[in-house]
Image (cartoon, rainbow, N blue to C red):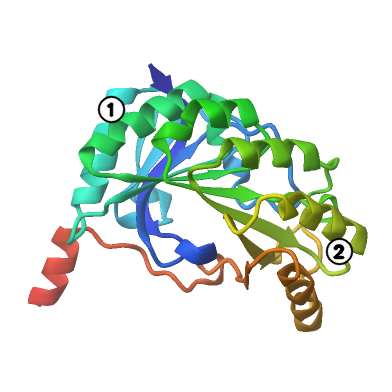
């Protein structure tokens, strides 16, 4: 069993209700979508090498690189090493991308290998591969799914795939993230809320204003966000508005234990 990965690093979750949670991130390489607001274009296709980022530093001069694909046992050992480099050790692994479920067999095998080591599994996904979700569901604790509004992605609607996906994710904690731009049509909101209406209180909706970047739409105004949250609360009991904290420079790198102890002793 091998995995095509983009990077591995330890850091703090920057989105939604699990923000500020220390996690080891396993970024899979390859994604079937080309969203206008994508913040990880380097992971859209499987890269030739995987970057291991000690302490989460973005400076690639500090990274270790290894040829893809990587054996499952190697990935597990790297996750354990990154988790144990912090004090206390990290107990969450985030499988992100790219699209982890594009490698469903490998994604499922990794989650099943990490859980006996004491990890909880946080899956970040586009939510358009319901069959793959069915295969990995038993090994996942939290599913953070993108609710892809066409006005934000620039792609065709995916409502039916999202609906089927969320049904397959039942039994996991389901977090639905809607990235929105200014002027998001009311018709798209109606489609999205109709999709969520049949899922009861088992879904958490996060309205996330798009982060400014080349090619992405304009961020919504505070008035738009307030109106959309009020609209959504008529259908979904738990609705929050949350920006990408890690894209705003809020999160420092998560320091390995050795570096942290050295800093304290100085």
Q: Please say if 222 is above or below 86.
A: below
Name the disc covering residue 27, or none. Answer: none
> In the structure shown, which secondary structural element does the residue marked by tag 2 occupy?
loop
Q: For residue 204, say whether it is visible.
A: yes
Q: In the rendering, at what x and y percent does residue 171 appear?
A: 49, 43
Q: Which of 14 and 168 lies nearest the eye of the viewer?
A: 168
Q: Which residue is mark 2?
A: 184
Q: On the picture, is 213 further left or further right than 172?
A: right
* Left or right of residue 213: residue 250: left
Distance (Cα) linking label 1 and label 2: 44 Å
Mark 1 near mark 2, Cβ–Cβ under 8 Å? no
Q: Is residue 178 above or below residue 47?
A: below
Residue at image position (72%, 50%) is 198
Q: Nearer the viewer, residue 13 or 10?
A: 13
- Lower sequence index among marks 1 and 2: 1
In what quadrant of the picture does the C terminus appear?
bottom left
Q: Which residue appears farthest toward the top when viewing the image?
A: 1
| Local crowd size for mark 2, using a 10 Å CA cut-off: few (<14), some (14–19), many (≥20) | some
Q: Reply above or below: 18 against 126.
A: below
Q: Quarter of the image holding residue 138?
A: top left
Disc 1 marks which residue? 74
Placement of the N terminus among the 4 image quadrants: top left
Residue 46 seen in the current view: no
- Residue 180: % across, % down: 76, 62
Q: Where residue 88 sits: x, y (%)?
A: 18, 60
């Amino acid at each position: 069993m091998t995995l095509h990965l983009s990077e591995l690093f330890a850091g703090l979750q920057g989105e939604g209700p699990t923000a500020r949670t220390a996690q080891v991130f396993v970024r899979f390489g390859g994604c079937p979508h080309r969203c206008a607001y994508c913040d990880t274009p380097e992971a859209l296709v499987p890269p030739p090498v995987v970057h291991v980022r000690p302490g989460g530093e973005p400076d690639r001069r500090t990274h270790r690189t290894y040829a893809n694909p990587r054996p499952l046992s190697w990935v597990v050992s790297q996750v354990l090493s990154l988790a144990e480099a912090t004090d206390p050790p990290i107990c969450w692994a985030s499988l992100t991308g790219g699209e982890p479920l594009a490698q469903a067999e490998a994604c499922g095998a990794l989650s099943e290998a990490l859980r006996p080591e004491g990890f909880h599994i946080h899956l970040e996904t586009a939510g358009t591969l319901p069959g793959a979700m069915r295969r990995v569901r038993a090994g996942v604790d939290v599913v953070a799914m993108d609710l892809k509004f066409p006005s934000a992605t620039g792609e065709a609607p995916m409502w039916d795939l999202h609906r089927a996906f969320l049904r397959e994710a039942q039994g996991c904690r389901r977090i639905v993230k809607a990235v929105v731009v200014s002027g998001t049509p009311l018709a798209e909101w109606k489609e999205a809320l109709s999709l969520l209406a049949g899922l009861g209180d088992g879904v958490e909706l996060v309205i996330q204003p798009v982060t400014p970047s080349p090619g992405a739409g304009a961020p919504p105004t505070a008035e738009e966000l307030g109106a959309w949250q009020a609209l959504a609360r008529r259908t979904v009991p738990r609705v929050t508005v949350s920006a990408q904290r890690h894209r705003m420079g809020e999160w420092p790198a998560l320091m390995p234990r050795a570096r942290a102890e050295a800093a304290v002793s100085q």
